[in-house]
Image (cartoon, rainbow, N blue to C red):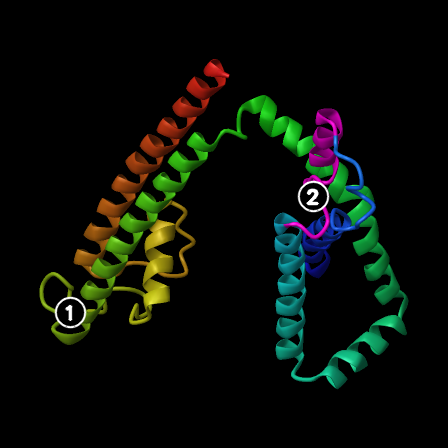
């Protein structure tokens, strides 16, 4: 997992730093050269010591500083990092992990990113409008999930205090939903009609609300995905 996370970050920083070398932009780039830089590296060189150059340099320094601070904060001290690195280098698995990161950065991730970019362009996925619609659809779906999460929490509290006829003289759910994270989790898996079964409704009123959420989830997912797919097809025809 660490390699999978570090490879794109390493690739991004290496390519961004490459464009800062003073000799890279000694002559103005032609249109084809700029396209090749964008396709292979992801960035085109800029004139040294200009405004964009300083912005990129500041970005590299800031990202490296944040990464270093996060690493030290996670380990607690530089000595702990040094000990861990020494233990890593003392085993074949450590060298395998380091070699895998460099191979993944320069021989795997770059070509895969290029091919993925061409594939997305072919499908029309590099157009911003479908992604905006998808983001809005996800926001709407999460809002509905949060709304039902509040309802589930309220039912859990009411059944825990009163346990009337609607609660069937028992707890509303198989485990308490006093935590907002638990309530959102249960609401999300219910709205997505996944239903892992680790949390289940027990009281009649909880089951009624759960059935209502499942019905709304089926219709909402179908509607939102249909709208996004329809917009993607329309955008592809206009390209």
Residue 206 in the image, given as x and y percentages of width and height: 21, 57
Q: Residues within 10 Å of mark 2 (few under 14, many from 20)?
A: many
Q: Which one is in front, 231 or 238?
A: 238
Q: Work out whether mark 2 precedes mark 1 in sequence or the reverse, and give the earlier one.
A: 2
The stretch of residues the image draws in magenta is 30-50
Q: SS for tag 1?
A: helix
Query: Which residue lies at the image location 31% right of the left edge and 44% below the top edge?
Result: 140
Q: Residue furthest left?
A: 165
Residue 198 in the image, given as x and y percentages of width and height: 41, 61
Classify residue 14 as left or right of residue 52: right
Q: Which one is in front, 217 or 39?
A: 39
Q: Which one is in front, 150 or 65?
A: 65
Tell me the residue that label 2 is attached to: 46
Q: Residues within 10 Å of mark 1 (few under 14, many from 20)?
A: some
* Callout count: 2
Classify residue 16 as left or right of residue 226: right
Q: Quadrant of the N terminus?
A: bottom right
Q: Is residue 193 located in the magenta-colored stretch of the structure?
A: no
Tell me the residue that label 1 is attached to: 158
Residue 193 in the image, given as x and y percentages of width and height: 37, 44
Query: Which residue lies at the image location 17% right of the left edge and 69% below the top edge?
Result: 159
Query: Which residue lies at the image location 30% right of the left edge and 70% below the top edge?
Result: 176
Query: Which residue lies at the image location 45% right of the left edge and 20% below the top edge?
Result: 235
CA distance for labels 2 and 1: 63 Å
Give the numbered dot on residue 114.
none
Classify residue 172 as left or right of residue 192: left
């Amino acid at each position: 997992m660490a390699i999978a996370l570090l490879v794109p970050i390493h690739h991004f920083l290496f390519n961004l730093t490459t464009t800062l070398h003073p000799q890279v932009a000694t002559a103005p780039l032609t249109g084809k050269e700029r396209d090749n830089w964008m396709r292979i590296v992801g960035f085109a060189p800029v004139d040294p010591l200009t405004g964009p150059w300083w912005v990129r340099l500041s970005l590299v320094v800031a990202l490296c500083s944040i990464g270093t601070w996060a690493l030290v904060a996670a380990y607690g001290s530089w000595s702990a990092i040094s000990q861990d690195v020494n233990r890593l280098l003392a085993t074949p698995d450590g060298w395998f992990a380091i070699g895998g990161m460099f191979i993944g950065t320069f021989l795997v991730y770059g070509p895969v990113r290029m091919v993925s970019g061409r594939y997305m362009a072919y499908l029309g996925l590099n157009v911003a409008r479908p992604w905006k619609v998808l983001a809005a659809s996800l926001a709407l779906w999460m809002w509905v999930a949060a709304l039902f999460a509040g309802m589930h929490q309220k039912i859990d509290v009411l059944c825990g205090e009163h346990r009337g006829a609607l609660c069937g003289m028992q707890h509303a759910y198989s485990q308490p939903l006093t935590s907002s994270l638990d309530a959102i989790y249960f609401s999300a898996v219910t709205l997505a009609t996944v239903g892992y079964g680790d949390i289940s409704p027990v009281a009649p009123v909880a089951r009624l609300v759960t059935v209502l959420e499942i019905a709304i989830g089926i219709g909402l997912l179908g509607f939102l995905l249909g709208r996004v797919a329809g917009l993607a097809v329309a955008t592809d025809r206009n390209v």
